[in-house]
Amino acid sequence: MNYKYIKIAIFVLLTACTQEPQETAKPTDSLANAVKPSEQPKAVPEVNDANCQFEYMKSITDKDIQQTLADNCARRNTTVKPVKHKNWSVR
């Protein structure tokens, strides 16, 4: 067996194990000051017949508000009804 390769492998392992870990980046004042204050979230329009029209929804430029209004309009006429429990049996 060739001891030259074993010596190289042991040397590589020892050097890898003795290295000190790298320091992580610490936040500085300039980074902390760079954080923008959160903006006020825009209000979603009230769900009614006028606001649920396709033309009105298409006129909204903010995609998040547009999607939220569309979701609310889709759910406005749904009502939760109790369901009769069925006894299922395997024959």
Image (spheres, grey):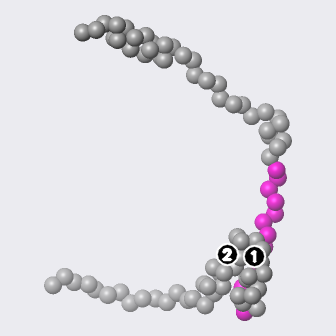
Q: Relative to 71, does residue 24 appear above or below in the rendering? A: above
- Residue 75: tell me if it is visible: yes
10 Å crowding of disc 2: few (<14), some (14-19), many (20+)? some
**Element type at marker 2?**
helix
What numbered label is drawn on residue 87? none
Q: Amino acid at mark 2?
A: Gln
Q: Position of residue 88 (x, y in %)?
A: 26, 84
Question: Quarter holding the C terminus?
Answer: bottom left
Which residue is depicted at the point 49% across and 13% down?
15
Which residue is depicted at the point 22% across and 83% down?
89
Look at mark 1 in the image and give the residue it sits on. 44
Q: Nearer the viewer, residue 59 or 47?
A: 59
**Element type at marker 1?**
loop
- Image quadrant of residue 34? top right
Which residue is depicted at the point 56% across and 89% down?
79
Question: Quarter holding the N terminus?
Answer: top left
Q: Position of residue 78 (x, y in %)?
A: 57, 88
Q: Relative to 67, does residue 33 appear above or below in the rendering? A: above
Look at mark 2 in the image and give the residue it sits on. 67
- Image quadrant of residue 62? bottom right
Segment colored magenta: 36-49
Asked whether 15 falls inside the magenta stretch, the response is no
Q: Nearer the viewer, residue 24 or 85?
A: 24
10 Å crowding of disc 1: few (<14), some (14-19), many (20+)? few
- Image quadrant of residue 33? top right
**Left or right, residue 30 beside residue 68:** right
Q: Relative to 5, does residue 89 appear above or below in the rendering? A: below
